[in-house]
Amino acid sequence: MSVDNTAKHPIPPGFEDALLKPADYTRMYDESIRDPDAFWAREGRRIDWIHPYSVVKNTDFTFGKVSIKWFEDGILNVSVNCIDRHLPTKAEQTAIIFEPDDPKATARHITYAELSEKVNRFANVLLSQGVMRGDRVVIYMPMIPEAAYAMLACARIGAVHSVVFAGFSPDALANRINDCGAKLVITADTAPRGGRRTPLKSNTDAALLHCSDRVRCLVVKHTGDQTTWIEGRDVDVLKLMDEVSPDCPPRPMNAEDPLFILYTSGSTGRPKGVVHTTGGYLVYAAMTHKYVFDYKDGDIFWCTADVGWVTGHSYIVYGPLANGATTLMFEGVPTWPDAGRFWEVCDKHRVTQFYTAPTAIRSLMGQGPEWVDRHDLSSLRVLGTVGEPINPEAWVWYDKHVGKGRCPIVDTFWQTETGGHMITSIPGAIETKPGSATLPFFGVKPEVLDPASGQIIEGNGVEGVLAIADSWPGQMRTLWGDHQRFMEAYFQQYPGYYFTGDGCRRDEDGYYWITGRVDDVINVSGHRMGTAEVESALVAHEKVAEAAVVGFPHQIKGQGIYAYVTLMNGVEPSDDLKRELETWVRTEIGPIAKPDLIQWAPGLPKTRSGKIMRRILRKIAEDDFGSLGDTSTLADPGVVDELIENRMNRA
Ligand code: 6R9
């Protein structure tokens, strides 16, 4: 079935009393662009300041002197905003619902009063270990409430956290500890996930072999599994938390003091330490969380990301807690013990907003709607997606089977670098189209640029690369210890703009469609094409579960189209099916999009956050797999050998 994604889906009934209506969006957006100082002067007050700011925006995108400051003379504390300020009215409200990996284990409900006590104690533990304002602390933790306590405890005393995803290897952990010069790493004994256990403490032990002897290790005894213990270096956090005072005065921080560093991979080189600061980040995370999810008091908000990614930072911890929300932390995976787990958790906790990634939707879609239908999803009000372009078929499936046609889908385009949503629909205010991130959030001024000349392409019905013309409060400020690299990576190629690295189309209605990283754009016989388009066509075929498309050198066309295709369970590969798919894509997009080579792929190389590693697929398609580069961040490195073995483009 192919989907008409040109028509707008109207706002579903029941959103007449949404926080923002269409007219509000237009009015506020216009003001945010026309007079950012006035707009953000007002919006900045949605959080509490110890000393209010008098300067709002002080930003310069000029290459060579890029400088980004927001609310620069304001003083605040993030943990006060996420905890203390809710205590007078919400002490007994649940702040965090913890749903463990094992569905038979009891969920935990942590009230704001408890959160306050835990974070204060945790902060005192950090102080007792000599952690001071400005010191870096690495957090390598499972998806448990203690991860949030650790982040907020750092914020309380002005330490800078850097969360490292628990799926990363000891080497990756060591590199990050060393790059930011962390004084301390916080981990847990082991991390249960999908019925298996990741040995976090022993990974940390292995990492610390490559770090300074001075780095301390705080261990949360979560499962009680046996671990090695180095006296004098390793500290039992939970035990120490019982011994220290439950009261830790918050450290007043400047708006531009760093709040956290988060490492993210670029297309080249070592991971980049993206730096976010205190005031602007929190204003932006809180505001986007509220409006984009139409968050209201009493809602139960569930973002399925891991706190190791920016999505977990902004939409599990900082945004929801700044708004006094109830946020759900899930330790498990979508497919264990069965493909109904997400929906079981939504049902059990009466989740109102559900936010996940297209890759999860596609994999659950492949298991059939009966897994969804077994659960009562009537509590759901808003659905969200993030991380990659969503193909219209997955969008329609999500809308129909999960949202039952009554929940707006917010397709949120943003990046680690942007701190919060950039281009996204808003329930009640912006009509959707399957696969489009729709319109810019307040203060975001997207421009479509000609990739070669860097000139602005005006008007609608145009395509190019996506750049942002002016700063917004959630923007990253620098790369840790390397401002020059920051400027080169984001401000050099298109002077005067922040360059996202993404391609994009603005359609006849002015809606934005992210076409994927520009390094994924291929040019076939002079036709520019997003690999995502071809993938989307392939996965629209009923026998296809997943597809990844890359370019490969082609003598006549310049680039040819190489498609890796994963079939639905039980479908047998055959040459006939290949021809069927070629014809299918021809009719879906046009003859120029017909794949030149199709390789059956039982699995695709993905990062642990679920992104397909196209760099590797491109190399295999180019018959150049001698230099695959770093494969250590793959969820399952084994799939690569299989793909090389059966590659289609042999010299
Ligand atoms: C939040 C996050 C950023 C890259 C970004 C783009 C892709 C994210 C998207 C999307 C299309 C969306 N991306 N959201 N593409 N539609 N709704 O994912 O951050 O891990 O830094 O990735 O992800 O390519 O440039 P991060």
Image (cartoon, rainbow, N blue to C red):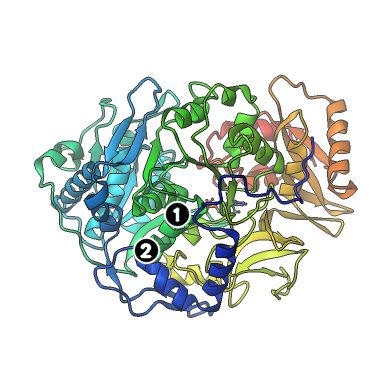
Residue at the image position 73 percent from the left and 73 percent from the top: 458
Q: With 194 as the anchor, is 395 left or right in this view?
A: right
Residue at which label 2 appears: 46
What secondary structure is marked by label 1? helix
The answer to whether any part of residue 444 appears in the image is no
Q: Does residue 463 appear to the left or right of 48 in the view shown?
A: right
**Rendering coords of residue 639 (x, y %):** 61, 32
Amino acid under disc 1? Lys
Q: Position of residue 400 (x, y in %)?
A: 65, 35
Task: Rate crowding at label 2 as few (under 14), some (14 to 19) or many (20 or more) other CA atoms within 10 Å.
Answer: some
Quick check: can you spot residue 167? yes
Q: Looking at the figure, which quarter contains the C terminus?
A: top right
The image shows residue 464 at horizontal and vertical percentages of 72, 65
Is tag 1's residue or tag 2's residue first in the polypeptide sequence?
2
Secondary element at tag 2:
helix
Residue 387 is left or right of residue 162, and the answer is right
Q: Is residue 25 above or below residue 314?
A: below
Residue appearing at x 54%, y 39% in the figure: 634
- The percent position of residue 162, horizontal first and vertical second, equals 36, 53
Residues at marks 1 and 2 touching, judged by CB atoms closer than 8 Å? yes
Q: Give the residue at mark 1.
A: 290
| Residue neighbourhood size for the residue with mark 1, other residues' Cα within 10 Å, grouped as few (<14), some (14–19), many (≥20) | some
- Residue at 60 percent across and 45 percent down: it is 13
Q: Nearer the viewer, residue 199 or 334?
A: 334
Residue 579 lies left or right of residue 5; in this view the side is: right
Task: Check mark 1 vs ligand 1: CB closer than 8 Å? yes or no.
Answer: no
Residue 96 to residue 602: above or below:
below
Compared with 644, 132 (above or below) is below
| Observer-nearest of 21 and 608 | 21
Tag 2: residue type? Arg
